[in-house]
Image: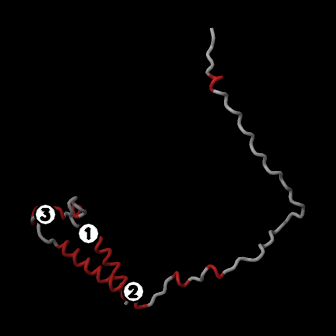
């Protein structure tokens, strides 16, 4: 029953999308591509069209299948993925890290720490830069 409802729901969703896209809105819609735009000229623009009725029926079927899917899924007692996973705190970290595999038996070479870069020289004072030139 659940699989049937899901398949029906998917078909109704696709059908509803197609019907809504085919309707002529204020901008014309996609119905003008298939010759539906001339219907307003011949038969008038007012009243319920067949596409509007199909949209209403499709929307009602969509809502009914949505509610039925909720009811069926809640009665099946489906479990959550979050509840099924084991808690992370039960796993403990190893007491000692594994020793790295050494292929070279020679003593490791130690390097001296890097020296900090020398501070840049102070800029010349503004007075010495703008001294007047005597003639």
* Above or below, comparing residue 90 to residue 132 in the picture: below
Point out the tag, 2 or 1, that comes first from the N-terminus: 2
Question: Image check: 92 left or right of 83?
Answer: right
**CA gap, disc 3 and disc 2:** 41 Å
Task: Name the residue that disc number 2 marks.
Answer: 3
Image coordinates of residue 42 in percent, x first then y, are 9, 63
Q: Residue at horizontal 22%, vertical 78%?
A: 57
Label 1 Cα crowd, 10 Å radius (few <14 / some 14-19 / many 20+):
some
What is the crowding at mark 2: few (fewer than 14 residues within 10 Å), some, or many (at least 20)? few
Q: Check if mark 3's residue and mark 1's residue have beta carbons within 8 Å.
A: no
Q: Which mark is residue 40?
A: 3
Q: Which of labels 3 and 1 is toward the front? A: 1
Q: CA distance from mark 3 to mark 1?
A: 17 Å
- Residue 66's x, y, as percent? 33, 81
Where residue 69 sits, quadrant-wise, is bottom left
Q: CA distance from mark 2 to mark 1?
A: 26 Å
Q: Which residue is mark 1?
A: 20
Q: Earlier in the sequence, mark 3 or mark 1?
A: 1
Q: For the C terminus, give its image quadrant.
A: top right
């Amino acid at each position: 029953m659940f699989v049937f409802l899901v398949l029906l729901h998917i078909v109704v969703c696709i059908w509803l999308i197609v019907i809504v896209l085919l309707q002529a809105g204020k901008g014309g819609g996609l119905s003008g591509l298939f010759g539906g735009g001339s219907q307003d000229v011949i038969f008038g623009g007012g009243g319920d069209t067949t596409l509007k009725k199909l949209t209403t029926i499709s929307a009602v079927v969509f809502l009914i299948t949505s509610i039925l899917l909720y009811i069926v899924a809640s009665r099946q007692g489906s479990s959550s993925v979050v509840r099924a996973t084991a808690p992370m705190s039960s796993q403990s970290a190893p007491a000692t890290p594994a020793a790295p595999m050494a292929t070279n038996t020679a003593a490791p070479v130690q390097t001296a720490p890097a020296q900090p870069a020398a501070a840049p020289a102070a800029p010349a004072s503004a007075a010495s830069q703008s001294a007047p030139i005597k003639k």
